[in-house]
Image: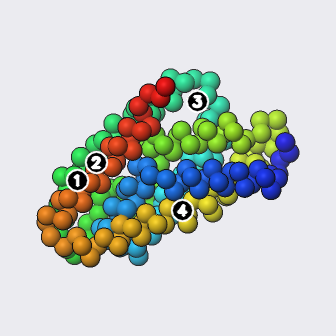
Amino acid sequence: MGVSLSTTQTIAFMTFAAVAAGTPGPSNVLLAAAGARGGIRHGVPSLLGQVVGMSALLLAVTLGIGGLLLDRPWLLETLKWGGALLLCWMAWNIATATFSEGDASAPAWSGFLGMAAFQWANPKGWLISVAANAAFLDQHGGILSRSLTLTVLFMLTALPCCLPWLAFGAALQHTLRTPRTWLVYRSVMAGLLVASVALFVWPHR
């Protein structure tokens, strides 16, 4: 396997990236919540932060952190459970938050920096990055070049795959006009966030 990716390898990785970025998970649940709160225009920074944060994590893992985690599984377990606790706390904040129409305030996890930083506490992000490191990185040469290539491909693939989650949340804005509908929506989002965490931390047989 050379430094550059073949067409088959590129297609395989982009398929992997599309599934990883577009399927339900903590980040996409929060992105939908950002869309419902501020619409697409105000949610774009959150979208870009999510994609850039995921890509930066992937780059860091492929450049060396991934090997460290693979050699020391307890580190990955620590990150996984620490992230899970943080996400459960965020789910509680979502479920109990108040919202009034025209309120310009936003939770700490929203926006470019908030969503980018959040990826480093996301168990799904770590597991995806470690999986990509094990499956697609050639350890025999050109690691930097290949890592950068994978990161760019992931970024280009993830952006359109995450956008529908923001659009979905924004589409609900017109129905979230009363305290009752916001309560239902917040409860559903919080439940989905906890469920997505459970999928990644629950032992698989």
**Mark 3 falls on what kind of element?**
helix
Closer to us: mark 3 or mark 1? 1
Percent x, y of residue 116: 47, 55
Closer to us: mark 3 or mark 4? 4
Q: Quadrant of residue 114?
A: bottom left
> Which residue ends up furthest to the right in the rendered image?
2
Q: What residue is rendered at 40% in x and 73% in y?
A: 40
**Mark 2 falls on what kind of element?**
helix
Give the vertical position of 78 relative to 90 (above or below). above
10 Å crowding of disc 1: few (<14), some (14-19), many (20+): some
Q: Are marks 4 and 1 in contact (CB under 8 Å)?
A: no
**Mark 1 falls on what kind of element?**
helix
Quadrant including the N terminus: top right
Q: What residue is rendered at 76% in x and 42% in y?
A: 143
The residue indicated by pointer 3 is 69
| Residue sitting nearer the eye, 183 or 110 | 183
Q: CA distance from mark 3 to mark 4?
A: 27 Å
Q: CA distance from mark 1 to mark 2?
A: 6 Å
Q: Is residue 82 left or right of residue 159?
A: left
**Mark 4 falls on what kind of element?**
helix
Q: Looking at numbered disc 3 in the image, what kind of residue is underneath it?
A: Leu
Percent x, y of residue 112: 45, 62
The residue indicated by pointer 2 is 191
The residue indicated by pointer 1 is 187
Q: Looking at numbered disc 1 in the image, what kind of residue is underneath it?
A: Ser
Give the vertical position of 199 relative to 191 (above or below). above
Q: Earlier in the sequence, mark 4 or mark 1?
A: 4
Q: Looking at numbered disc 2 in the image, what kind of residue is underneath it?
A: Gly
